[in-house]
Amino acid sequence: MKIAIPTAGGHVDEHFGHARTFTIFTLSNSGEVLEEETFYPPSGCGCQSTVGVTMQAKGVSLMLAGNIGQGAITKMAGHGISVIRGCAGEIRDVLTRWQRGEITDQDILCTHDGCGHQGN
């Protein structure tokens, strides 16, 4: 299984659409981290970019994110990537907490205030 996390300085980036890097963890069937990769997304804000296409090609099936808009969630779903929203903290800690079942989707959406593309 491959899990992506929008990353800023080793922590979950607060806004998916502004993330300059993603960390992709490859997990074994037992949940052991087999590989950790830094991925630099193409330019463009979130749902406006081709980040979902690239993540799908890399085999990502889940993203643990902070704030994310509905347009980006829809695009990720179109590429077979589920999103768990409302994550915060150091990325390895977030991954571990998710594996323990301590993190679930928070059903929150970014309203895109200040992003320059309302409603996308």
Image (cartoon, rainbow, N blue to C red):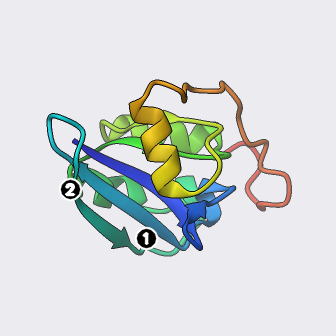
Q: Which residue is painted at 65% across and 38% down in the image?
A: 86
- The image shows residue 97 at horizontal and vertical percentages of 49, 37
Amino acid beneath label 2: Ala
Q: Earlier in the sequence, mark 2 or mark 1?
A: 1
Location of mark 2 (residue): 57
Q: Viewer-proximal residue, 44 or 59? A: 59
Q: Is residue 57 left or right of residue 44?
A: left
Asked if residue 74 can be seen in this view, the reply is: no
Location of mark 1 (residue): 41
Q: Decide: is 99 above or below 56.
A: above
Whether tag 2 and tag 1 are in contact, CB under 8 A, the answer is no
Q: Quadrant of residue 46?
A: bottom right
Q: Decide: is 43 above or below 112.
A: below
- Disc tally is 2
Q: Decide: is 93 above or below 37.
A: above
Q: Which residue is painted at 51% across and 56% down in the image?
A: 91
Q: Which residue is painted at 39% across and 52% down in the image?
A: 4
Q: Secondary structure at mark 2?
A: helix
| Quadrant assignment for the N terminus | top left
Q: Is disc 2 surrounded by few (<14), some (14 to 19) or many (20+) residues within 10 Å?
A: few
Residue farthest right in this picture = 113
Amino acid beneath label 1: Pro
Q: Quadrant of residue 82?
A: top left
Q: Viewer-proximal residue, 43 or 35? A: 35
- The image shows residue 117 at horizontal and vertical percentages of 73, 56
- The image shows residue 78 at horizontal and vertical percentages of 36, 37
Q: Which residue is painted at 36% across and 38% down in the image?
A: 81
Marks 2/1: CA–CA distance: 13 Å
Q: Secondary structure at mark 1?
A: loop
- The image shows residue 75 at horizontal and vertical percentages of 45, 42
